[in-house]
Amino acid sequence: MTKASMVEAEAEARAAAEARAAAEAEARMAKAREAKAARRSRFRDRSIPSVAKRLNLPEHELRRAVGRGEVATFRWGGRDRISAAEEQRIAALMADA
């Protein structure tokens, strides 16, 4: 093997290693983006407007009920959220009415 071909082989091996490292880094970043999106969407549909829409209630009535303490909420991301259990309780109350 000539010296030139050895240099070419080393350059190819280096390029292949760099490509593998770049692909692995991209895979890690994609996984991190997916995890972040999952954390963000965890309580996104638990907001007062989205719950009111699902239950076919006017948003202002649901907010008034929260203000009166009739509906329990929790804070997430600086906003009031309604738990799934609380939403089911409200739906059951509406079905009985």
Image (spheres, helix red, strand yellow):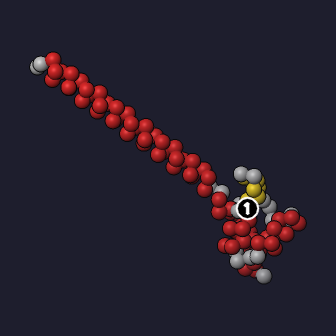
User: What is the quadrant of residue 89 in the picture?
Assistant: bottom right
Q: Looking at the image, which residue sits at the far right? A: 68
Count of numbered badges drawn on the protein = 1
Q: Which residue is rendered at x = 16% and y = 21% of the image?
A: 4
Residue in front for this viewpoint, 42 or 89 = 42
Q: Is residue 48 left or right of residue 16?
A: right
User: What is the quadrant of residue 70 in the picture?
Assistant: bottom right
- How many residues crowd around disc 1 within 10 Å: few (fewer than 14), some, or many (20 or more)? many
Residue in front for this viewpoint, 10 or 44 = 10
Q: Which residue is rendered at x = 67% and y = 73% of the image?
A: 54
Q: Is residue 12 left or right of residue 76?
A: left
| Position of residue 56 measured from the top left corner of the image (x, y, whole percent) | 70, 77
Which residue is tagged 1? 82
Residue in front for this viewpoint, 35 or 12 = 12
Q: Looking at the image, which residue sits at the far bottom? A: 97
Residue in front for this viewpoint, 20 or 74 = 20
As drawn, 46 above or below 91: above
| Position of residue 52 measured from the top left corner of the image (x, y, whole percent) | 72, 71
Q: Is residue 3 left or right of residue 17?
A: left
Mark 1 element type: loop
Q: Which residue is rendered at x = 29% and y = 27% of the image?
A: 14
User: What is the quadrant of residue 69 in the picture?
Assistant: bottom right
Image quadrant containing the C terminus = bottom right
| Position of residue 24 measured from the top left corner of the image (x, y, whole percent) | 40, 37
Q: Which residue is rendered at x = 73% and y = 59% of the image?
A: 81
Q: Looking at the image, which residue sits at the far top? A: 3
| Position of residue 6 measured from the top left corner of the image (x, y, whole percent) | 18, 21
Image quadrant containing the N terminus = top left
User: At label 1, which amino acid type do we have?
Assistant: Ile
